[in-house]
């Protein structure tokens, strides 16, 4: 990921996504995060995001943040006003009301825009930069900010129909990217634990990623071995319809935690972290036979 994508991904990480549950809001949140993290052409991705239904304000807040970050090439974090604009526009793109986050307290970044939060401005961060805006959006942009070049008359479309480069549903399937793999593995674990309806879909997507990792010679050897053994396990539970078996839940938990540790560790220090689950992956059949 680029510097800007890393900063945006950190903002997604700070969003209290656990409170979204396992419904459509959480699914939309994960799809947005994954597509933005994997974007190869950031400006084009923002243009497509602006055309996706309900996401125009989110696209504009990201454009505004991008412009500011490009002017400050050394900055590796979002400012308070950038974070506030992002969080509010993201919340709106998910269809959430201010009241949905009323339990976070007065100092929360998710407080209502006009709340008197200590140390924070009650003014809309982007509203102070003038009236230039894209027609139909309530978020204004700086007069000198770059534009998305989206015709004002163009109708927005549901996010599923906004073109092949912004599918947001299966884009995380069939990629070897470790960051995307880790998030998909975590979502799969959560779905298995909660019995969510999309656990079979997530299993299919995770298996597609396993195959992509195996085929990508540029990936670390221990990562490829992990994906190969995990795919063997997932194929077994899929063939034997064991997704709801409590033993599967326990095993997936024990397999996901080392990968999360491996992912968060500096590359030079990763050696051996995944070894702790290799034996478990190889001997899993003994638990079911």
Image (cartoon, helix red, strand yellow):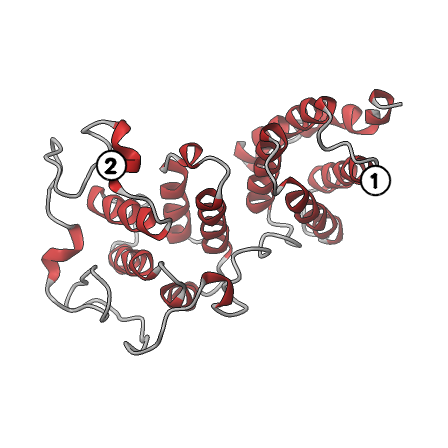
In-front residue for pair 21/281: 21
* Distance in Å between CA atoms under marks 1 and 2: 45 Å
Where is residue 37 drawn, in percent x and y?
47, 52
Residue highlighted by disc 1:
239
How would you rate the neighbour count of disc 2 (Cα within 10 Å): few for under 14, some for 14-19, many for 20 or more? many
Residue at 58% across / 57% down in the picture? 171
Looking at the picture, does residue 205 appear above or below residue 160?
above
**51, 281: nearer the viewer:** 51
- Categorize mark 1 by other alpha carbons within 10 Å: few (<14), some (14-19), many (20+): few
Residue 277 occupies quadrant: top right
Relative to 104, residue 82 above or below: below
- For this view, does 33 lie left or right of residue 270? left
The answer, for residue 284, to whether it is visible in the render is yes
Q: Is residue 213 left or right of residue 21?
A: right
In the rendered image, the residue lying farthest to the right is: 289
| Most foreground residue, 70 or 159 | 159
Tell whether 207 sits left or right of 173.
Answer: right
Across and down, in percent, residue 103 comes to 27, 27
In contact (CB < 8 Å): disc 1 and disc 2? no
Residue pictured at 73% horizontal, 42% vertical: 224
Secondary structure of the residue carrying tag 1 is helix
Q: Position of residue 150 (x, y in %)?
A: 32, 75
Which quadrant of the rendered structure holds the C terminus? Answer: top right
> Image height check: is 246 above or below 238?
above
Which residue lies under the disc numbered 2? 109
Q: Secondary structure at mark 2?
A: loop
Q: Is residue 231 left or right of residue 44?
A: right
Give residue 285's position: percent from left, percent from top: 85, 26
Q: 92 or 207: which is nearer to us?
A: 92
Between tags 1 and 2, which lies in front? 1
In the image, what residue occupies the spot 46% across and 49% down?
28
């Amino acid at each position: 990921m680029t510097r800007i994508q890393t900063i945006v991904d950190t903002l997604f990480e700070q969003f209290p996504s656990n409170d979204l549950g396992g419904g459509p809001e959480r699914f939309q949140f994960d799809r947005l995060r994954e597509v933005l993290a994997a974007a190869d052409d950031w400006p084009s991705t923002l243009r497509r995001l602006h055309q996706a239904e309900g996401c125009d304000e989110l696209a504009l807040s990201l454009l505004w943040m991008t412009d500011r970050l490009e002017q400050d090439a050394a900055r590796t974090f979002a400012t308070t006003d950038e974070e506030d604009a992002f969080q509010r526009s993201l919340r709106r793109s998910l269809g959430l009301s201010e009241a949905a986050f009323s339990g976070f307290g007065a100092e929360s970044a998710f407080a209502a825009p006009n709340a008197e939060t200590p140390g924070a401005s009650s003014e809309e961060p982007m509203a102070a930069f003038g009236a230039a805006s894209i027609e139909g959006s309530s978020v204004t942009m700086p007069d000198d900010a770059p534009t998305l070049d989206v015709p004002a008359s163009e109708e927005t479309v549901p996010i599923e129909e906004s073109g092949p480069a912004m599918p947001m549903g299966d884009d995380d399937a069939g990629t070897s990217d470790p960051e995307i793999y880790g998030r998909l593995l975590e979502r799969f674990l959560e779905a298995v634990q909660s019995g969510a309806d999309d656990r079979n879909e997530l299993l299919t997507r995770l298996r597609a990623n396993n195959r992509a990792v195996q085929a990508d010679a540029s990936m670390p050897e221990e990562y490829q071995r992990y994906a190969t053994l995990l795919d063997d396990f997932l194929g077994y539970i899929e063939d034997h319809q064991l997704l709801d078996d409590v033993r599967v839940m326990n095993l997936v938990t024990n397999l996901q935690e080392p990968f999360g540790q491996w992912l968060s560790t500096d590359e030079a220090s990763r050696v051996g972290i995944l070894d702790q689950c290799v034996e478990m992956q190889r001997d899993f059949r003994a638990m079911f036979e």
